[in-house]
Amino acid sequence: MLTASKRAACQRYFEEKFGVSSPEDLAIFRDELRAHRITLADEQALRDHSDSDALASYERAALSLLQAVCDLQKGDRLWAAVKLYYSVFYSLKTEILLERYTPIRAGRVLIFDCKQGEFCKQYNGRSSGDHGLAIALAKRYFSESDVLQSQSIDGIMTYEWLKSVREVVQYRLRRPPELEKFDPFFSDEQWDLGNQIETFLADTEPYYAFDADYAALAIPVKRFQLTSQRLMNENMNLDSEFRSYLDRYFEAGSLSNRFQALLPS
């Protein structure tokens, strides 16, 4: 079940392995981490831990998406854009973990390929923050298999484009007139919101995710659909308590109902 304070299981695994309890303390053993070759026992343990972390990230992706759709249905189109971005961010974290790549923080970011015989690689990207890291690793590890990375929006990678939308809302708009004028979504007066969602779910190209008029909603909808299918293909199940918690978003008449069938059992 999603909790606010639960730290990543993979991070804790390496901290406990070196007898520490924080990323800052783990930095003392960064050289030892670089020299550590993944054993069979590590691989087996990290598979369980990465599954746990992946499900925790997916829970956050689901919750962010459903809350955003409810906000849109109520006419709150500003903060819905932020929540939709976070849904994509958490979906990407889920995908990275399911690829068995684990970012570990030890002063710097180290990336473990959680397979027997592998060593970690130091991440040297420009952005080591959680958001920049998730996008960078998505580009590095599954750009060829991710349909949402097959094209761009005006020359900008889809996830980076959506991140820029979120940054406009959170960091650039300061006063009510600015906030009221900004709307990244296609008008639901011209195209019913429920029909938009159904179209984006059915869009296998996906055409709408690469069109700036529709992408703020189309990218999160398609990313969540793809990640949900990935979890089902991996036979991963959601915590029953969390499934029950989500029922509040599946009331009669709610547009969130479009996503209920996507959730793993």
Image (spheres, grey):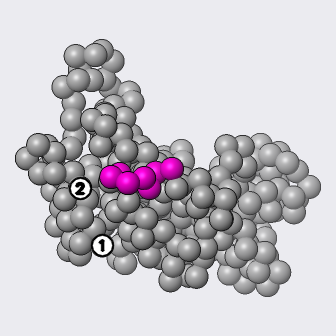
Q: Residue furthest left?
A: 190
Q: Nearer the viewer, residue 72 or 146?
A: 72
Residue 194 in sight: yes
Residue 9 in the image, given as x and y percentages of width and height = 74, 60
User: Of label 2 and label 1, which has the lower sequence position?
Assistant: 1
Residue 77 horizontal side relative to residue 252, left or right: left
Residue at figure coordinates x 77%, y 43% from the top left: 24
Residue 262 in the image, given as x and y percentages of width and height = 42, 70
13 within the magenta span? no
Residue 23 in the image, given as x and y percentages of width and height = 75, 47
Q: Nearer the viewer, residue 244 or 209?
A: 244
Q: Mark 2 points at which residue?
A: 194
Q: Quadrant of residue 117?
A: bottom right
Q: In which quarter of the image is the C terminus?
A: bottom right
Residue 238 in the image, given as x and y percentages of width and height = 61, 67
Q: Quadrant of residue 205?
A: bottom left
Q: In this view, does 139 lie above or below 109?
A: below
Residue at figure coordinates x 27%, y 23% from the top left: 179
Residue 220 in sight: no
Rendered image: mark on residue 147: 1
Residue 258 horizontal side relative to residue 215, left or right: right
Q: At numbered mark 1, what does the secondary structure look like: helix, strand or loop?
A: helix
User: What is the three-letter code of the residue carrying label 1?
Assistant: Val
Residue at figure coordinates x 22%, y 16% from the top left: 177
The residues colored magenta run: 248-254
- Whether the residues at callouts 2 and 1 have beta carbons within 8 Å, the answer is no
Q: How crowded is mark 1: few (under 14 residues within 10 Å), some or many (20 or more)?
A: some
Dominant SS type (magenta) = loop
Residue at figure coordinates x 51%, y 50% from the top left: 248
